[in-house]
Amino acid sequence: MRKVVKVIMYIYRDNDGRKEFFILHRRRNDVVTLTGHVADSEEIKNESIENAARRETIEELGVEPISVIDLEMNIEVEMEERGKDIISVEHSFLVQIPNKDVHFLEGDEKHQWHTINELYNTLTYPNQKKPLDKIKELIV
């Protein structure tokens, strides 16, 4: 199976002391954090995973992150992507953005803001729930 390197971005804003996380409610009836691929193209040679998280935040939300913290959690997930079985090597990041409403720029999926405690019951996939305890420790 082919390995694909991805970043999972737990994007949040500080709304007057309330930490709110950006979550997509996709048309395929799942609820997810933002993810992206680490680029290895001519335009972006040897992109670091941290730079990929920063770039993906800008591309998908149109906003420059205030901070990007590597949660140092790498999770391998077997999945299907574009009809092929792959192993997704997912690197998790906590990304703070300015306190303003943003919209997903790469599709028409709905988004909502959730607290960290709500994410435990809201996110669809177990691999996206694994970093939540560590995030909770960092943002308290």
Image: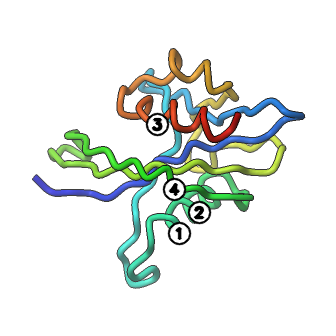
Q: Is residue 65 left or right of residue 107?
A: right
| Discs 3/1, front | 3
Q: CA distance from mark 2 to mark 1?
A: 5 Å
Q: Which residue is mark 2?
A: 54
Asked if the residue at tag 1 contacts the one at tag 3, i.e. Cβ–Cβ closer than 8 Å, the answer is no
Q: Which residue is mark 3?
A: 131
What type is the residue that disc 3 sits on?
Answer: Pro
Q: Is residue 41 left or right of residue 33?
A: left
Q: CA distance from mark 4 to mark 2?
A: 11 Å
Q: Residue furthest right?
A: 16
Q: Which residue is mark 4?
A: 70
Residue drawn at the location 85% of the way across and 33% of the way down: 17
Q: Nearer the viewer, residue 45 or 76?
A: 76
Q: Which residue is mark 1?
A: 51
Q: Position of residue 11 (x, y in %)?
A: 63, 44
| Discs 2/3, front | 3
Q: CA distance from mark 2 to mark 3?
A: 18 Å
Residue drawn at the location 38% of the way across and 27% of the way down: 125
Asked if the residue at tag 1 contacts the one at tag 2, i.e. Cβ–Cβ closer than 8 Å, the answer is yes
What type is the residue that disc 1 sits on?
Answer: Asn
Residue drawn at the location 31% of the way across and 44% of the way down: 75
Asked if the residue at tag 3 contacts the one at tag 4, i.e. Cβ–Cβ closer than 8 Å, the answer is no
If you read the primary sequence from the N terminus, does the residue marked by circle 4 or circle 2 appear first? 2
Q: CA distance from mark 4 to mark 3?
A: 11 Å
If you read the primary sequence from the N terminus, does the residue marked by circle 4 or circle 3 appear first? 4
